[in-house]
Image: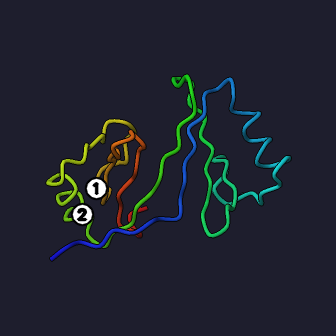
Amino acid sequence: MTTKIEGGINIAMKVPSHQYEATVAFYRDTVGLAPIPEKAPAVGFKLGPNQLWIDEDATMSQAEVWLELFTPNSGGALQRLAEAGVVRCDPIEPLGEGFRGGWIMNPANIVHMVREPDAW
């Protein structure tokens, strides 16, 4: 049986410290996206049916976009992806003990969280 994988709702933009405030102001003030205040201090905006999270990262030299994939069976999905040669990158950001999911990279080195929808 093939484990179903589909797009999630969260998009994370990892932004270097020297670009963080201007990036947040761009989405808040220039574009005018509605904020997601219930997750403060995390900074997020409603992006249509998705949620855009802006994360400051002092160790980065340029911004990256990270995407989310949902699956009802993270173990099966991650195994299927591994068998297809997909690179796992779990050390990139800890997800916590018992989290039902993990991190992968696509061939263009875009990070994806693969998780069960109720894992968080």
- The quadrant in which residue 11 appears is bottom right
Lower position in the chain sequence, tag 2 or tag 1: 2
x, y percent for residue 102? 31, 51
Nearer-the-camera pick, 40 or 8: 8
Q: Position of residue 27 (x, y in %)?
A: 76, 48
Amino acid on which disc 2 is placed: Ala
Helix, strand or loop at label 1? It is loop
- Quadrant for the C terminus, please: bottom left
> Of residues 5 and 92, which is closer to you in this image?
5
Position of 43 with respect to 9 (left or right) is: right
What is the three-letter code of the residue carrying label 1? Gly
- Categorize mark 1 by other alpha carbons within 10 Å: few (<14), some (14-19), many (20+): few
Q: Is residue 120 left or right of residue 103?
A: right
Nearest to the eye among marks 2 and 1: give it.
2
Closer to the camera in the image, 62 or 51: 62
Q: Quadrant of residue 88?
A: top left
Residue 83 x/y as whole percent: 14, 54
Say what secondary structure mark 2 lies in: helix
Cβ–Cβ under 8 Å for marks 2 and 1: no
The residue furthest bottom is 1
* Residue drawn at (57%, 33%) of the image: 63
List the residue tagged with mark 2.
Answer: 77
**Residue drawn at (34%, 44%), measured in percent from left and top?**
105
